Structures are given as C-alpha cells and as structure tokens.
Image (cartoon, grey):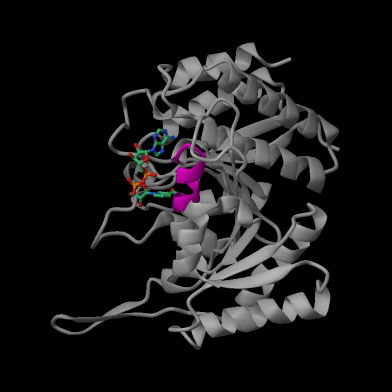
Amino acid sequence: MPTTHQAVLIPGDGIGPAVSAAVLKILKAADAPVAFHQHHAGIAALADSGEVLPQSTIDAVREHHVALKGPCTTPVGKGFSSVNVQLRKKLDLYAAIRPVRSLPGVPTRYTDVDLVIFRENTEGLYSGIENEITDGVVTSLKIATRTACTRIAQRAFEYAKKRDRKKVTVFHKANILKLSDGLFLDCVEKVHDEQFPDIPYETQIIDAGCMKLVQDPTQFDLLLMENLYGDVISDLTAGLVGGLGVVPGSNIGETDAVFEAVHGSAPDIAGKGIANPLALLMSAVMMLNHLAESRKDDRCLTAANAIKNAYNKALEDNQKTGDLGGNLNTDQFANAVIQRLT
Ligand code: NAI
C-alpha cells in the first residue's frame, strides 16, 4: 500500500479555487493520506494552454485515476463546448452518483431526505450534436445506446444492493420519447429482472415525478435517469436539503473517478470569499471513501469519518455560510470544521 495516494486537483473557475483551497486545508488537518497534483481546466486553463481542457489534465487523471474537481464555467450560447461534458466523455465517467441528504442544523421543509441520484453521464441530449437545418430551424440529437443504458442500470442496482437502498425509481419521458427513453426503460428493466429481481423497482414519468419529489421526497430512494434529467433533478433535490452548497457528487468510470460538487462556478458570488465549501468537501469525503474501498486503505476511511463528523458538528453548532443562513465566510467555515476534527 502506498504511503500517500496521488490524486489530481482541478480547482476550476469562479468560486472553484476558493472552495478548493478550503477543502485542501481541511484534508490536511484531517491527515488524509492524499497528495494532490494540480492541473487546470475551464477558463483557468485557457491562459496557459489556449485550451479549456488541456491534454495534460486528461493524462494526469488517467495516470492517477482519481481527481477532485472544482466547477468550470461554460458560457451560454456560442463558444467552447462544456469542459465537464468533454471530461466525462473522454474519461468515460459514465455514472454520476449524487447523494442528497438532510443535514443537521440546516432547517428545510423536510428533515429526513435521503436520496441518491444516478445520472447517465455520457449521452442523451448532452451529445451536443446540434444542427441549424435552415435559418430559424435547429435540431438537437438525443442519443441512447443499449450499452450505456445497461451499464448505468447495472451500476445503480449494484449500488442499491450493496448499500441496502429500499427501491430504485427510473424517471423517464418514454410516453413522448418512445424510442430513446423507451430503450433506457427496456435496458433498466432487463437488468432488474435478470440480475436484481429482489430490489423493488418502479418507473415514473418525470413531470409527475417532480411534483411527487417536492410533495414528499421520502417516497423515493435511488433515482436513476438519463443525462439531462439527472442534471435538472440534481438541482431540484438540492433545493430540498439546503441548496447547491451542500450536494456532492462523483463521476465514475471503470478505471477513473472524478469527484465534484453538483454546483457550478457561481459567478454571482465569485471572488467574494463567501461560497460554501461544503459540497466540495463532501465530494472529497466521497473520494476518500472511494480510495478506502478501492485501495483497501482504512486511513482514508478514518479521515473521511472524521471530516464528516466535524462538518456535521459545525452545522449543529450553527457554524454556517451565508447560503445556509449563517454569517461565516468560506475560510471561517473551513476553520470551524478543522476545530471540530477529533
Ligand atoms: P451555479 O451552481 O454556479 O449557481 C447557482 C446559484 O447557486 C447561484 O446563485 C450561486 O451563487 C449559488 N451557489 C452555487 N454554489 C454555491 C456555493 N458553493 N455556495 C454558495 N452559493 C452557491 O449555477 P449557474 O449559475 O447556473 O452556472 C454558473 C456556471 O457554472 C455556468 O457556466 C455553468 O455552465 C457552470 N456549471 C459548472 C458545473 C461543473 O463544473 N460541474 C456544474 C453546473 C454549472
């Protein structure tokens, strides 16, 4: 076992560098056995390399297999294509896994939300294949393949089984998108029936699913869906537990894993020092748990548990950033977590 695990840090744009710095400080204080190699992506990479996703960044993730990533800005409309989409496709990080849980000390409408979103991360409308057929007429291509639909279903049911989740629900729109969402449903059903028949499984048309989610999120457990739906539902469910400052995520492939918060680069608060670093910190905890499991290293598990307990205690003690109704800045929140590490 190596003394220290090597990982890539991509600070990203906007609030990314500030929340990354806060998280690194906490990881160091918790003695997490991880050394980071910093590489850039997003607008941060443009000045040095002239590219938003330099090959050296991709190569570094391929070399070390694990990365912690801050958000990268993607301008609306014309311009470069999304760094996140490129990164996920190039590294074939086909499963976005996003736990959404109620937190102590963060009052919201519901106190007992415990959801996991499984988002297919490589196709759907995120193919980015758009054409202007003629002036004023545009088409966008939604891609669904049996291979991608089956492997995300497989991953989701494996996760549900391992973590003893109660139920898998697929959100879809197969009543309208009969072929693409129809294929997604077929693949999930096949994986369920052939390999995981004991795990309760249901389907839900997504518009009604959204209504049910905000009415009573506890009726769901693991939510499985294609790319764009997963993007939207992630933010919707973030709103059930305190907002984008508290929802972490991972992008997992067969060999590589990139851990990042659900939120973006938050240009409205960038440079003000007030962003909540918790979502990236939780993503770092997911990274430590991944290392603990994949490399059989209990030190990662110890650090992960210590950080988790410390941030829960900080929240219980009302130590919070502005997005959660508190008055701490990014660094003060990081210090509050560090003070509670035991
Ligand atoms: P956003 O998630 O950056 O911000 C939405 C709202 O949530 C803003 O009011 C922001 O201030 C707030 N917020 C987000 N994270 C926060 C945090 N940690 N602490 C406190 N408040 C926080 O979404 P938006 O504005 O739609 O996108 C901004 C940029 O980020 C776009 O260029 C978008 O493409 C990119 N983006 C990148 C992602 C990634 O790199 N994984 C994910 C989502 C968006």
Identify the image quadrant of the C terminus.
top right
Q: Quadrant of residue 47?
A: top left
Q: Quadrant of ligand 1?
A: top left
> Which range of residues does the magenta coloring cover?
235-243
Q: Position of residue 70 (x, y in %)?
A: 48, 40
**Residue 318 appears anywhere in the view:** yes
Q: Is residue 103 above or below residue 62?
A: above
Residue shown at 66% from the left, 31% from the top: 35
Q: Position of residue 44 (x, y in %)?
A: 37, 41
Residue shown at the point (46%, 61%) measured from the top left: 210
As rendered, which of 142 and 64 lies closer to the eye? Answer: 142
Position of residue 305 measured from the top left corner of the image (x, y, whole percent) = 74, 29
Quadrant in the picture for the N terminus: top right
146 vs 59, nearest the viewer: 146
Name, please, the residue furthest toward the front. Answer: 215
| Majority SS type along the magenta span | helix
Residue 262 against residue 3 in the figure, above or below: below
Residue 251 is at least partly visible in this image: no
Q: Is residue 242 magenta?
A: yes
Relative to 289, is 299 above or below?
Answer: above
Q: Nearer the viewer, residue 93 or 91?
A: 93
